[in-house]
Amino acid sequence: MGCPAGIGPEIILKTLYYFQKTNPEVLKKIIIVGDKKVLSDNAHSLGYSLPEVEIDSISELNIKPGIPTLEGYKAMADYFYKAIELAKKKEVQAIITAPISKEGLNKVGVNYSGHTEWLAKEFNVDKYAMTFYGEKMIVSLVTIHIPLKEVPKNITPDKIFDVAKLSYEFLKKLKITDPKMAICGLNPHAGEGGLLGKEEETIIKEALQRCKKEGIPLSGPYPSDSLFYWAYKGRFHLIIALYHDQGLIPFKLIHFEDGVNITLGLPIIRTSPCHGTAYDIAGKGIANPQSFISALKLSLRLLSN
Protein backbone atom coordinates (compact mmCIF):
# COMPACT_ATOMS: atom_id res chain seq x y z
CA MET A 1 0.00 0.00 0.00
CA GLY A 2 2.97 2.31 0.29
CA CYS A 3 2.77 5.24 2.66
CA PRO A 4 -0.74 5.27 4.16
CA ALA A 5 -0.71 9.08 4.33
CA GLY A 6 0.11 9.44 0.64
CA ILE A 7 -2.01 8.83 -2.46
CA GLY A 8 -1.29 5.07 -2.44
CA PRO A 9 -4.61 4.02 -0.85
CA GLU A 10 -6.56 6.27 -3.23
CA ILE A 11 -4.89 5.07 -6.43
CA ILE A 12 -5.22 1.44 -5.32
CA LEU A 13 -8.97 1.90 -4.82
CA LYS A 14 -9.37 3.70 -8.14
CA THR A 15 -7.39 0.95 -9.88
CA LEU A 16 -9.59 -1.75 -8.35
CA TYR A 17 -12.71 0.05 -9.53
CA TYR A 18 -11.24 0.40 -13.00
CA PHE A 19 -10.73 -3.37 -13.21
CA GLN A 20 -14.06 -4.06 -11.55
CA LYS A 21 -15.67 -2.32 -14.52
CA THR A 22 -13.36 -3.58 -17.29
CA ASN A 23 -12.07 -6.99 -16.17
CA PRO A 24 -13.45 -8.10 -12.79
CA GLU A 25 -11.65 -11.47 -12.95
CA VAL A 26 -8.43 -9.59 -12.17
CA LEU A 27 -9.67 -8.81 -8.65
CA LYS A 28 -9.60 -12.53 -7.80
CA LYS A 29 -5.84 -12.55 -8.39
CA ILE A 30 -5.02 -9.66 -6.06
CA ILE A 31 -4.01 -9.45 -2.41
CA ILE A 32 -3.74 -5.95 -0.95
CA VAL A 33 -1.11 -5.78 1.77
CA GLY A 34 -1.84 -2.73 3.88
CA ASP A 35 -4.42 -1.32 6.25
CA LYS A 36 -8.13 -2.09 5.80
CA LYS A 37 -9.18 0.86 7.95
CA VAL A 38 -7.13 3.32 5.88
CA LEU A 39 -8.60 1.85 2.69
CA SER A 40 -12.13 2.07 4.14
CA ASP A 41 -11.60 5.69 5.17
CA ASN A 42 -10.32 6.55 1.69
CA ALA A 43 -13.17 4.65 0.04
CA HIS A 44 -15.69 6.56 2.18
CA SER A 45 -14.19 9.92 1.21
CA LEU A 46 -14.35 8.90 -2.46
CA GLY A 47 -17.96 7.75 -2.15
CA TYR A 48 -16.97 4.12 -2.79
CA SER A 49 -17.60 0.89 -0.96
CA LEU A 50 -14.65 -1.44 -0.53
CA PRO A 51 -14.43 -3.80 -3.53
CA GLU A 52 -14.46 -7.56 -3.03
CA VAL A 53 -10.75 -8.25 -2.95
CA GLU A 54 -8.51 -10.03 -0.46
CA ILE A 55 -6.94 -7.62 2.04
CA ASP A 56 -4.05 -8.67 4.27
CA SER A 57 -4.46 -5.95 6.88
CA ILE A 58 -1.41 -5.72 9.12
CA SER A 59 -2.08 -2.35 10.76
CA GLU A 60 -5.01 -0.29 11.99
CA LEU A 61 -4.04 3.34 11.77
CA ASN A 62 -5.77 6.63 12.33
CA ILE A 63 -4.04 8.50 9.54
CA LYS A 64 -4.79 11.95 8.19
CA PRO A 65 -4.12 12.04 4.42
CA GLY A 66 -1.18 14.27 3.57
CA ILE A 67 0.25 14.18 7.10
CA PRO A 68 2.81 11.36 7.41
CA THR A 69 3.74 10.05 10.85
CA LEU A 70 6.41 7.76 12.26
CA GLU A 71 3.69 5.18 12.94
CA GLY A 72 2.67 5.38 9.28
CA TYR A 73 6.27 5.10 8.11
CA LYS A 74 6.73 1.96 10.22
CA ALA A 75 3.55 0.45 8.76
CA MET A 76 4.72 1.41 5.25
CA ALA A 77 7.88 -0.65 5.77
CA ASP A 78 5.90 -3.53 7.34
CA TYR A 79 3.62 -3.76 4.30
CA PHE A 80 6.62 -4.22 2.06
CA TYR A 81 8.26 -6.77 4.34
CA LYS A 82 5.00 -8.75 4.27
CA ALA A 83 4.79 -8.60 0.45
CA ILE A 84 8.38 -9.86 0.20
CA GLU A 85 7.54 -12.68 2.62
CA LEU A 86 4.57 -13.72 0.44
CA ALA A 87 6.79 -13.67 -2.64
CA LYS A 88 9.52 -15.75 -0.99
CA LYS A 89 6.88 -18.32 0.01
CA LYS A 90 5.69 -18.29 -3.63
CA GLU A 91 2.21 -17.26 -2.54
CA VAL A 92 2.40 -14.34 -5.00
CA GLN A 93 4.20 -14.04 -8.35
CA ALA A 94 4.28 -10.26 -8.61
CA ILE A 95 4.50 -7.27 -6.29
CA ILE A 96 3.05 -3.90 -7.28
CA THR A 97 4.26 -1.18 -4.95
CA ALA A 98 2.45 2.05 -4.19
CA PRO A 99 4.69 5.07 -3.48
CA ILE A 100 6.84 5.21 -0.36
CA SER A 101 8.76 7.99 1.37
CA LYS A 102 12.51 7.32 1.27
CA GLU A 103 12.92 9.90 4.04
CA GLY A 104 10.30 8.00 6.04
CA LEU A 105 12.13 4.70 5.59
CA ASN A 106 15.30 6.30 6.91
CA LYS A 107 13.46 7.70 9.92
CA VAL A 108 12.31 4.21 10.98
CA GLY A 109 15.71 2.64 10.44
CA VAL A 110 15.27 1.10 6.99
CA ASN A 111 18.41 2.21 5.19
CA TYR A 112 17.55 1.67 1.54
CA SER A 113 17.27 4.39 -1.07
CA GLY A 114 14.19 2.77 -2.60
CA HIS A 115 12.25 -0.38 -3.44
CA THR A 116 14.74 -1.46 -6.13
CA GLU A 117 17.79 -1.77 -3.91
CA TRP A 118 15.70 -3.22 -1.09
CA LEU A 119 14.30 -6.01 -3.29
CA ALA A 120 17.72 -6.82 -4.75
CA LYS A 121 19.09 -7.29 -1.24
CA GLU A 122 16.13 -9.36 -0.03
CA PHE A 123 16.32 -11.72 -3.02
CA ASN A 124 20.14 -11.82 -2.96
CA VAL A 125 20.41 -10.45 -6.50
CA ASP A 126 23.51 -8.53 -7.58
CA LYS A 127 22.58 -8.05 -11.25
CA TYR A 128 19.43 -5.99 -11.54
CA ALA A 129 18.17 -2.94 -13.36
CA MET A 130 15.70 -0.14 -12.77
CA THR A 131 13.68 0.19 -15.96
CA PHE A 132 10.81 2.46 -16.95
CA TYR A 133 8.15 1.26 -19.35
CA GLY A 134 5.72 3.22 -21.50
CA GLU A 135 4.00 2.63 -24.82
CA LYS A 136 6.19 5.27 -26.48
CA MET A 137 9.48 4.73 -24.66
CA ILE A 138 11.34 2.25 -22.44
CA VAL A 139 14.41 3.36 -20.47
CA SER A 140 16.87 1.34 -18.36
CA LEU A 141 19.36 2.94 -15.96
CA VAL A 142 22.99 1.94 -15.41
CA THR A 143 23.31 3.92 -12.15
CA ILE A 144 20.35 4.71 -9.94
CA HIS A 145 20.19 6.71 -6.71
CA ILE A 146 23.67 8.15 -6.33
CA PRO A 147 25.00 11.73 -6.39
CA LEU A 148 25.77 13.06 -9.86
CA LYS A 149 29.47 13.57 -9.02
CA GLU A 150 29.77 9.80 -8.36
CA VAL A 151 28.25 8.70 -11.67
CA PRO A 152 31.44 8.49 -13.84
CA LYS A 153 33.33 6.21 -11.44
CA ASN A 154 30.27 3.94 -11.09
CA ILE A 155 29.92 3.31 -14.84
CA THR A 156 31.81 0.17 -15.88
CA PRO A 157 31.68 -2.11 -18.94
CA ASP A 158 30.34 -4.91 -16.73
CA LYS A 159 27.48 -2.79 -15.37
CA ILE A 160 26.50 -1.64 -18.84
CA PHE A 161 26.58 -5.19 -20.15
CA ASP A 162 24.48 -6.52 -17.27
CA VAL A 163 21.83 -3.83 -17.78
CA ALA A 164 21.85 -4.44 -21.55
CA LYS A 165 21.37 -8.18 -21.07
CA LEU A 166 18.49 -7.75 -18.62
CA SER A 167 16.90 -5.14 -20.88
CA TYR A 168 17.14 -7.41 -23.92
CA GLU A 169 15.53 -10.25 -21.97
CA PHE A 170 12.75 -7.87 -20.92
CA LEU A 171 12.02 -6.89 -24.53
CA LYS A 172 11.83 -10.57 -25.44
CA LYS A 173 9.38 -11.18 -22.58
CA LEU A 174 7.25 -8.41 -24.05
CA LYS A 175 7.35 -10.41 -27.31
CA ILE A 176 8.79 -7.49 -29.26
CA THR A 177 10.08 -8.75 -32.60
CA ASP A 178 13.52 -7.61 -33.79
CA PRO A 179 14.20 -5.49 -30.67
CA LYS A 180 16.52 -2.49 -31.06
CA MET A 181 18.35 -0.86 -28.17
CA ALA A 182 20.62 2.19 -27.92
CA ILE A 183 22.85 3.65 -25.23
CA CYS A 184 23.39 7.30 -24.34
CA GLY A 185 26.79 8.91 -24.18
CA LEU A 186 27.85 10.24 -20.81
CA ASN A 187 29.25 13.52 -22.12
CA PRO A 188 27.75 16.23 -24.35
CA HIS A 189 27.66 15.12 -28.02
CA ALA A 190 28.66 11.63 -26.82
CA GLY A 191 32.17 12.93 -26.11
CA GLU A 192 32.75 14.50 -29.56
CA GLY A 193 35.38 11.92 -30.47
CA GLY A 194 37.17 12.30 -27.13
CA LEU A 195 37.25 16.10 -27.09
CA LEU A 196 34.56 16.35 -24.40
CA GLY A 197 35.33 13.19 -22.45
CA LYS A 198 36.83 9.74 -22.87
CA GLU A 199 34.19 7.43 -21.38
CA GLU A 200 32.49 6.83 -24.74
CA GLU A 201 35.75 5.70 -26.37
CA THR A 202 36.79 3.45 -23.51
CA ILE A 203 34.14 2.20 -21.08
CA ILE A 204 31.06 2.30 -23.32
CA LYS A 205 32.88 1.01 -26.39
CA GLU A 206 34.15 -2.01 -24.45
CA ALA A 207 30.61 -2.79 -23.25
CA LEU A 208 29.27 -2.50 -26.80
CA GLN A 209 31.88 -4.93 -28.11
CA ARG A 210 30.89 -7.45 -25.45
CA CYS A 211 27.19 -7.00 -26.27
CA LYS A 212 27.93 -7.62 -29.95
CA LYS A 213 29.72 -10.89 -29.11
CA GLU A 214 26.74 -12.02 -27.02
CA GLY A 215 24.16 -11.11 -29.68
CA ILE A 216 22.64 -8.24 -27.72
CA PRO A 217 21.35 -5.59 -30.18
CA LEU A 218 22.79 -2.50 -28.49
CA SER A 219 24.11 0.41 -30.58
CA GLY A 220 25.65 3.78 -29.72
CA PRO A 221 26.77 5.66 -27.83
CA TYR A 222 24.57 8.48 -29.13
CA PRO A 223 24.19 12.06 -27.88
CA SER A 224 21.34 11.86 -25.40
CA ASP A 225 19.87 15.19 -26.55
CA SER A 226 18.82 13.57 -29.85
CA LEU A 227 18.59 9.88 -28.94
CA PHE A 228 15.37 10.23 -26.98
CA TYR A 229 13.74 11.98 -29.93
CA TRP A 230 14.54 9.07 -32.23
CA ALA A 231 13.32 6.56 -29.65
CA TYR A 232 10.07 8.49 -29.36
CA LYS A 233 9.76 8.32 -33.14
CA GLY A 234 10.08 4.52 -33.00
CA ARG A 235 13.65 3.91 -34.14
CA PHE A 236 14.59 2.19 -30.86
CA HIS A 237 12.52 0.09 -28.48
CA LEU A 238 14.68 0.77 -25.42
CA ILE A 239 17.30 3.30 -24.34
CA ILE A 240 20.00 2.67 -21.77
CA ALA A 241 20.73 5.86 -19.84
CA LEU A 242 23.83 6.16 -17.69
CA TYR A 243 22.34 8.05 -14.76
CA HIS A 244 18.99 8.75 -13.18
CA ASP A 245 17.97 12.13 -14.56
CA GLN A 246 19.48 11.53 -18.00
CA GLY A 247 16.85 8.86 -18.52
CA LEU A 248 13.96 9.99 -16.38
CA ILE A 249 13.58 13.61 -17.45
CA PRO A 250 12.66 12.70 -21.05
CA PHE A 251 10.75 9.58 -19.99
CA LYS A 252 8.55 11.41 -17.51
CA LEU A 253 7.98 14.27 -19.93
CA ILE A 254 6.15 11.70 -22.07
CA HIS A 255 4.94 9.11 -19.56
CA PHE A 256 4.52 10.93 -16.25
CA GLU A 257 0.85 9.92 -16.00
CA ASP A 258 1.05 6.34 -17.30
CA GLY A 259 4.68 5.18 -16.98
CA VAL A 260 5.69 2.09 -15.02
CA ASN A 261 8.81 1.42 -12.96
CA ILE A 262 9.90 -2.24 -13.18
CA THR A 263 12.82 -3.98 -11.48
CA LEU A 264 14.57 -6.40 -13.85
CA GLY A 265 16.64 -9.35 -12.63
CA LEU A 266 14.42 -10.47 -9.74
CA PRO A 267 12.91 -13.96 -9.41
CA ILE A 268 9.49 -12.26 -9.26
CA ILE A 269 7.81 -9.45 -11.18
CA ARG A 270 7.87 -6.08 -9.47
CA THR A 271 6.24 -2.96 -10.88
CA SER A 272 5.17 0.39 -9.52
CA PRO A 273 3.84 3.75 -10.68
CA CYS A 274 6.59 6.22 -11.55
CA HIS A 275 5.41 9.01 -9.25
CA GLY A 276 5.76 9.68 -5.54
CA THR A 277 3.54 9.90 -2.46
CA ALA A 278 2.09 13.31 -3.47
CA TYR A 279 1.25 14.31 0.09
CA ASP A 280 0.08 17.70 -1.20
CA ILE A 281 -2.96 16.16 -2.91
CA ALA A 282 -3.55 13.13 -0.66
CA GLY A 283 -7.14 12.92 0.54
CA LYS A 284 -8.45 15.34 -2.06
CA GLY A 285 -9.77 12.65 -4.40
CA ILE A 286 -7.89 14.01 -7.41
CA ALA A 287 -4.97 11.57 -7.68
CA ASN A 288 -4.57 10.06 -11.15
CA PRO A 289 -4.47 6.22 -10.95
CA GLN A 290 -3.31 5.68 -14.55
CA SER A 291 0.33 4.88 -13.69
CA PHE A 292 -0.78 2.32 -11.09
CA ILE A 293 -3.28 0.83 -13.56
CA SER A 294 -0.44 0.54 -16.09
CA ALA A 295 1.77 -1.12 -13.46
CA LEU A 296 -0.88 -3.78 -12.83
CA LYS A 297 -1.49 -4.28 -16.56
CA LEU A 298 2.24 -4.75 -17.21
CA SER A 299 2.49 -7.30 -14.40
CA LEU A 300 -0.43 -9.27 -15.86
CA ARG A 301 1.10 -9.08 -19.34
CA LEU A 302 4.43 -10.43 -18.14
CA LEU A 303 2.74 -13.20 -16.16
CA SER A 304 0.71 -14.24 -19.20
CA ASN A 305 3.90 -14.29 -21.34
Image: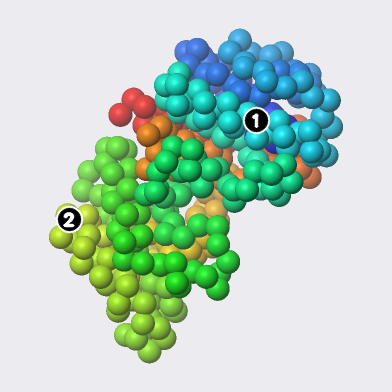
The residue positioned 78% from the left and 45% from the top of the image is 280
- Measure the C-alpha gap from mark 1 to mark 2: 41 Å
Along the line of sight, which residue is nearer the eye, 272 or 259? 272
Q: Nearer the viewer, mark 1 or mark 2?
A: 1
Q: Residues within 10 Å of mark 1 (few under 14, many from 20)?
A: some
First in sequence, mark 1 or 2: give its number.
1
Along the line of sight, which residue is nearer the eye, 3 or 53? 3
The image position of residue 239, as x and y in percent, is: 37, 58
Quarter occupied by residue 78: top right
What amino acid does circle 1 point to? Answer: Asp
Q: Are marks 1 and 2 in contact (CB under 8 Å)?
A: no
Q: Residues within 10 Å of mark 2 (few under 14, many from 20)?
A: few
The image position of residue 247, as x and y in percent, is: 48, 60
Q: How many marks?
A: 2
Judged left or right of residue 8, residue 279 is: right
Can you say whether 71 is above or below 121 in the image?
above
Residue 250 in view of the camera: no
Q: Quadrant of the C terminus?
A: top left
Judged left or right of residue 279, residue 181 is: left
Which residue corresponds to mark 1? Answer: 78
Judged left or right of residue 190, residue 66 is: right
Looking at the image, the residue that sits furthest to the bottom is 195
Which residue corresponds to mark 2? Answer: 214
The image position of residue 220, as x and y in percent, is: 29, 68
What amino acid does circle 2 point to? Answer: Glu
Residue 122 in view of the camera: yes
SS at badge 1: helix
The image position of residue 82, as x and y in percent, is: 58, 26
SS at badge 2: loop
Can you say whether 126 is above or below 88 in the image?
below
Judged left or right of residue 53, residue 46 is: right
Looking at the image, the residue that sits furthest to the top is 52
